[in-house]
Image (cartoon, helix red, strand yellow):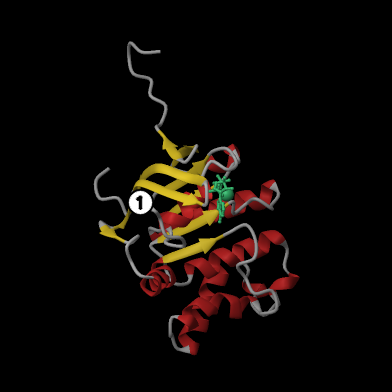
Amino acid sequence: MNNPIISARNVVKQFGQTKALRGASLDVAPGEIVAIMGPSGSGKSTLLHSLAAIIGIDSGEITLAGKRIDTLKDDARSKLRRTHFGFVFQFGQLVPELTVLDNVALPLLLNGEKRTAAYERAKRWINKVELGDKADNIVGELSGGQMQRIAIARAMVIQPKILFADEPTGSLDTLNSQKIMELFIAMAREHGTTVIMVTHEPSIAAYADREVIVRDGVVAAAAQHAPGRM
Ligand SMILES: Nc1ncnc2c1ncn2[C@@H]1O[C@H](COP(=O)(O)OP(=O)(O)O)[C@@H](O)[C@H]1O
Ligand SMILES: [Mg+2]
């Protein structure tokens, strides 16, 4: 692939005796939506966390727009995450006691933006996920589907280059899952955001531009149907 936005090259990651990644490689193009599939325990989340600079790796390389990020020190890594990456997980990344507006403005305030501008921008993103009427509600009062839409607004408010999602629809019903995937597609198409998500649900992965499969800690090669071979 020419000029991938992010790449993993031969990534190895071990937890104690467990080899979670055994030489995983993946290139993702700018603006692409990639679904990482594979059996439970195969290393999907570890691959996502490695790409997202949440965890360090034992060997191999992670590059963002051609520059190594796996070798960054902790504080540089956390700054990179705060400024370039958005995260949507299955549960828990919102502060339940705060309002929707406070939750979505928080990443901007943490990045040192002025309150007025931060709250204005947060409101725009809450409107984009069609929850403008809930801006002043406490997050803990929302439904699961609404919380995930707010999580997307909160992830997008910093205009990340890459949105990372781990089982983002894992706790949702079909209709709410569809809404989440439609939002990811809108983010990729309208804002050029690259979306990398882990899911074990084929119906969810089908929304992606590309599906890759992780097996035993490596990204399995895509199925090839070369002429003359079975
Ligand atoms: N923080 C951790 N400490 C110890 N073992 C871990 C940790 N994270 C993942 N593992 C192990 O690494 C393997 C891959 O895990 P994971 O990447 O979470 O798989 P998946 O997301 O595909 O279900 C599993 O055997 C898991 O138990
Ligand atoms: Mg996982």
Looking at the image, is 226 positioned above or below residue 4?
Answer: above
Q: Nearer the viewer, residue 118 or 164?
A: 164
Find residue 93 and report its image quarter: bottom right
Left or right position of 135 against 46? right
Q: How many dots with numbers?
A: 1
Badge 1 amino acid: Ser
Residue 8 placed where, x, y %?
35, 49
Q: Is residue 129 visible?
A: no
Single out the residue that lies furthest toward the right. 141
Q: Nearer the viewer, residue 198 or 181?
A: 198
**Circle 1 sits on which residue?**
59
Single out the residue that lies furthest toward the front. 17
Left or right position of 157 against 229? right
Q: Is residue 32 visible?
A: yes
Residue 85 placed where, x, y %?
43, 65
Q: Nearer the viewer, residue 92 or 109?
A: 92
User: For the C terminus, which image quadrant?
Assistant: top left
User: For the N terminus, which image quadrant?
Assistant: top left
Residue 178 placed where, x, y %?
61, 49
Residue 50 placed where, x, y %?
43, 55
Q: Residues within 10 Å of mark 1 (few under 14, many from 20)?
A: some
Q: Nearer the viewer, residue 15 or 90?
A: 15
